[in-house]
């Protein structure tokens, strides 16, 4: 099939990929890193659609990439994109795959499991050339694609969140809500399961309900919708466990503005500064993970093995808010069981 003529956006991308990055500077005092002796490696990072600015997971990825870029600015060219749509993401990936094989080592980082089907379709049309590697986030690679993948398990940290929630609302006459961005995402489904298990293991008497904000990835960028639903949720729930990306900001905003708002949990990064109603945060040190994968690839030419990282790895955790330190002993006592159950779940 004849490939359509490249549009202006794609042309700019290909030009960028064809030339070396210029204009990088050090902080003035440190000696610049030595230039690579061979062809300059190239990395493209593609964030989730509309994901940057979520004050959570995607911004943490950005922090890791920027840290890596600061350290290795003389060794590698890095291009970062935050597509506005899946069509734009598809063009970016297929144009990269269509580039002919070269001597330049090339890595494409797919920073969201929402792109899993897109990656499968793209690789069905264009295979990876020898100089290219592809890293896929938060996936178990069910279609056995020729890519490296990793997943951060939220089960163990969410188990500890459930244990803490049971203690924090003991005696309350309202129920508990697990709010998901959308159904069909295995990663956040594991978080729901972990929270339920932790809550029930600690004798939580309230019933745990689950709702979704949307039918697709837009559930991660619906902060206003979450805010608008909080009046209704506050009447029924004493605790909300939100696994909805940037949409969680709507919940945190409501808890700051209403004294009778339910308790809640931070997600992806320590969100305790957002509201005193945040008992603790399920943290995912994705900045450290992406740095590890990119640095290994740059040093060796190969990506580390596909992996699942849980509570025991240190890449995920349940971090209590400084306003709720009274639950420290409960969390510490439950940690070993959370690790044990997560290992079984993996």
Image: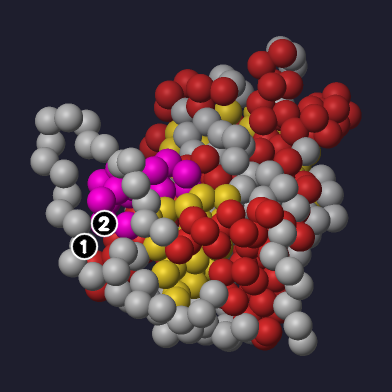
Q: Which residues are magenta?
A: 61-76
Q: Residue at x 47, y 34 (%)?
A: 270
Badge 1: residue crowd in 10 Å (few <14, some 14–19, many ≥20)? few
Image x and y of residue 148, in percent:
47, 75
Image x and y of residue 163, in percent:
54, 45
Say which residue label 2 marks: 75
Is the residue under label 2 in contact with that under label 1 (CB below 8 Å)? Answer: yes
Say which residue label 1 marks: 36
Measure the alpha-carbon separation of dots 1 and 2.
6 Å
Looking at the image, residue 239 sits to the left or right of residue 213; the answer is: left
Residue 266 is at least partly visible in this image: no
The secondary element bearing badge 2 is classed as: loop
Q: In terms of secondary structure, what is the magenta stretch mainly?
A: helix
Instruction: Tell whether position 25 is magenta.
Output: no
Q: Quadrant of the N terminus?
A: bottom right
Q: Residue at x 42, y 85 (%)?
A: 130
């Amino acid at each position: 099939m004849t490939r359509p003529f490249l549009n202006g956006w794609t042309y700019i991308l290909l030009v960028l990929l064809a030339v070396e990055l210029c204009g990088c500077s050090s902080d003035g005092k440190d000696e610049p890193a030595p230039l690579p002796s061979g062809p300059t490696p190239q990395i493209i990072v593609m964030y989730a659609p509309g994901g940057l600015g979520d004050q959570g997971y995607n911004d943490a990825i950005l922090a890791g990439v920027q840290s890596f870029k600061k350290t290795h600015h003389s060794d590698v060219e890095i291009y970062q994109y935050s597509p506005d749509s899946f069509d734009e993401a598809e063009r970016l990936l297929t144009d990269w795959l269509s580039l002919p094989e070269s001597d330049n080592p090339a890595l494409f980082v797919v920073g969201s499991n929402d792109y899993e089907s897109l990656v499968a379709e793209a690789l069905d049309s264009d295979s990876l050339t020898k100089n290219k590697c592809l890293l896929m986030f938060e996936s178990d690679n069910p279609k056995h694609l020729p890519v490296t993948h990793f997943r951060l398990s939220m089960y163990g940290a969410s188990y500890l969140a459930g244990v803490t929630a049971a203690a924090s609302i003991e005696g309350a006459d309202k129920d508990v809500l697990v709010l998901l961005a959308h159904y069909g995402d295995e990663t956040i489904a594991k978080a729901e399961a972990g929270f339920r298990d932790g809550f029930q293991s600690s004798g939580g008497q309230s019933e745990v309900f689950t709702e979704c904000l949307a039918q697709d990835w837009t559930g991660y960028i619906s902060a206003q919708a979450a805010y608008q639903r909080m009046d209704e949720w506050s009447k029924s729930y004493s605790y909300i466990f939100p696994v909805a990306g940037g949409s969680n900001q709507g919940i945190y905003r409501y808890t700051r503005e209403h004294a009778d708002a339910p308790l809640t949990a931070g997600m992806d990064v320590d969100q305790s500064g957002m509201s005193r109603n945040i008992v603790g945060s399920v943290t995912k040190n994705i900045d450290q993970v992406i740095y590890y994968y990119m640095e290994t690839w740059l040093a060796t030419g190969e990506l580390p093995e596909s992996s699942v990282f849980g509570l025991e790895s240190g890449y995920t955790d349940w971090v209590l808010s400084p306003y709720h330190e009274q639950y420290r002993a409960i969390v510490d006592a439950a940690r070993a069981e959370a690790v044990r159950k997560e290992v079984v779940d993996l």
